[in-house]
Amino acid sequence: MISTVLVANRGEIACRVFRTCRELGIRTVAVHSDADEHALHARVADATVRLPGATPQETYLRGESIVKAAVASGADAVHPGYGFLSENADFARAVLDAGLVWIGPPPEAIEAMASKTRAKELMGIASLDHVTEADLPVLVKAAAGGGGRGMRVVRQLADLDAELTAARAEATSAFGDGEVFVEPYVEGGRHVEVQILADTHGTVWALGTRDCSLQRRHQKVIEESPAPGLTEELARELGESAVRAARAVAYEGAGTVEFLISPDGRPHFLEMNTRLQVEHPVTEAVFGIDLVALQLRIAEGEPLETAPPRPRGHAVEARLYAEDPAADWTPQTGTLHRLSVPDGVRLDTGYADGDDIGVHYDPMLAKVVAHAPTRAEAVRKLAGALDRATVHGPLTNRDLLVRSLRHKEFTTAHMDTGFYDRHLTELTTSAPDPHAPLAAALADTHGRSRFATGWRNLPSQPQTKRYVMAGEEHEVHYRHTRDGLTAEGVRVIHADAGLVVLEVDGVRRKFEVAQYNADKVHVNATTLTALPRFPDPTAQLAPGSLLAPMPGTVVRVAEGLAVGASVKAGDPLLWLEAMKMEHKITAPVTGRLTALNAVPGQQVPLASLLAIVQPT
C-alpha cells in the first residue's frame, strides 16, 4: 500500500490531494519554488523539498528535479495534479523508472491521448494543415496541456502567423512543449465533457456529464454536473464514446473526454485529458465519491465496483480568480488579506489569509462548489454564497461570477462558449453601492472622533473624504455634532472601525469595513481607494504613457519597433507574460513612439513605464 505521496504540483490541487491523503493516513510531501516557499501547500505538507528558481520552467516543469525530490523524501508514489507535467509521458516514465508508483494513466495512454493532435488521429479526425479563407474561423491550440493556455481564435487569415507564434510561446512557457495545431472553431457551441475512471482490471466508469461552457480566454469559469438540457440519447452517446476512447488506449485512473456540442446538437470530439480536472468536485458532489481516493485505490491495484454509484442532485462550481474582467481579464497580484465563504458550500483553495498572490502562476484563488437537489437550487445557493463571501485583497472576478450565475441565459441553461463575448460589458458594468464611501469615511474617522476635545455650541465644518470606487471619484461629507456623526440624508445608527449601520429611507443597512493598508478599504463586497487630501504633484505622467498593467516579463517587442516609429491606436507594441498567460500591450493613442523602456526578458513591476506614444 502507498505510504507517502509527493504531489508534483502547487496551490489548490496540491492542497486538495493532501487533504485526502491525510484522511487515508498517507504521509505527504510538497515541492515548492522559491516564490512558493511560504505557500499554503508547502505549509500543510508533512515534508517539503525546494525546487530552486521561481518560474515554472525552472521548477514545476523540471521532471528530473521532482523525481529526485520524491526519492530523497522517501515518497513511494507521485501524484501529478493537473497542469504542469500531469500529461507528460516522459515524466510518468521517469517516476516509474525510479521505482515509484505513478498515480495516473500508463505513459502509453498519455502519449496516445495527452497530445491533442495524436488523440484526434486516434479518433479518426484530421487537423487543418493548410488554412484558407473558407476555413475561418479557426482555433489555434496547444497540443499539450490545457487551461486555455496556447489557444487563439483566428478570424482573419492575415492574423494566423502571429497567433501561431503567440500560441507556441505561451504553450512552451506553460507546458514545456510548443507544439500547436489548428482546428475548425465551432461558433455558439457548448463545452460538455465526461468524467471517466478506469481500474487495472478492465472496469471503466463513465461518471455523467459536465457543462463547462462559461469560459474566458478558453479557460473554464463556471462548471456544473450534470450538463443541463441534453437528451438522454445524447448523454448516453457521449458516455459510450468516452468509454470507447478509454478502452482504446487501455486507460487507467481518472480522465476526461471533452466534446463541443454544436447548436444543432451534434457532438464534436475535442480531446481527452489524461489527468484529474479542475472541475472534478462537481462530479464528486453528484456521485458522492472522492476521486482522489479512487485514484489512489486504482494505483494500488484495487478494483472498482462493477458499476458506479447512482448520481443525485446537481452541483455547480465557480472559479474565483484574481483578475479584472473589465480590463481584458488582467491578472492581479498582492496580498489576499481575507477569504471566507458561508457554511454549506465547498471551498477548495491554495491560499490562506495573509498569503501573497505572485506573478509566476495561474491567478485562480479558489473554487466554490454548491450541491442541491435541483439545478435551480444549486445555482441560487452558489450565487448567494459568493455574494456573501468575504474577499479582501486584489481585485477578483467575484462580482462577475454572481452576475453570471443570475443571468437569465445561464439560469435557463441556454448558454454557450460565447457567453462572455456577448455579455461581458453588462456583467462588468453595475452601479456600485452609493453609501459605501460614506461607510468607509465614518469607519475611518471613528478612532479620531473618540479623542475630540468635546462638542462646542458652534456648527462644525463638514469633514470631507474622497474615494475612488468602480473607477470613479466620490466625495463624501459628514459632521461631528453633540448627537454623534451625521450625514445628509442618512441617519447614522452606529459607527466603529469595523461596522457602520446606516438608516436610509427607514431601512437599516449594515456595512462591514476592513482596511489593511493606507489606501485600500473594503466595504462589504465593494473595494475603494482612499485618495490623499492633497494630491502628489510629482505623480504626473506624460500624455500617451503606457504603464505595465501587472508585474511580469517582457516576452517580445513588435518586430521593427523603435523610438521614432509611427503607431496607430491599438497596434501591438509588446507582450508581457504574467501568471502563465501572455498579455498584449497596445498603443493607447495614434502618434509617435518617443520612449521604449522594455526589452525581451526584462522583469517589469506593476505600473512601470513601458513606453510613451506622443499623440498626433
Image (cartoon, rainbow, N blue to C red):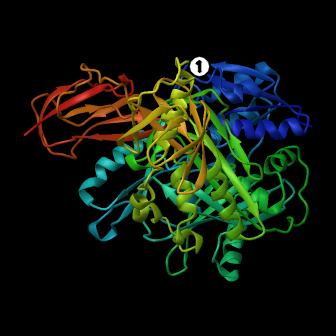
**506 in relation to 328, above or below:** below
> Label 1 is placed on what type of residue?
Asp
Please tell me whether residue 447 is drawn above or below residue 472 in the rendered image.
Answer: above
Is residue 473 at all visible to an observer of this figure? yes
Q: Position of residue 440 (x, y in %)?
A: 50, 36
| Place of residue 123 in the rendered image (x, y in percent of width and height, measured from the top left) | 58, 66
Q: Quadrant of the C terminus?
A: top left
Residue that label 1 marks:
34
Identify the image quadrant of the N terminus.
top right
Q: Residue at x 23, y 56 (%)?
A: 158
Q: Residues within 10 Å of mark 1 (few under 14, many from 20)?
A: some
Residue drawn at point x = 29 percent, y = 65 percent: 132
Which of these two is toward me, 453 or 510? 453
Coordinates of residue 149 in the picture (x, y in percent): 48, 46
User: Farthest residue toward the left?
Assistant: 616
* Residue 212, position as x, y percentages in the image: 59, 61
The residue at 81%/29% (across/down) is 28
Horizontal placement of 303 versus 403: left or right?
right
Q: Is residue 80 visible?
A: no
Q: Residue at left 84%, top 46%?
A: 293
Q: Quadrant of residue 529?
A: top left
For the view shown, which residue lies furthest in the front direction? Answer: 457
Q: Quadrant of residue 244?
A: bottom right
Q: For numbered disc 1, what is the local secondary structure?
A: loop
Q: How many marks?
A: 1
Horizontal side of 612 relative to 455 (left or right) equals left
Residue 135 is drawn in which quadrant? bottom left
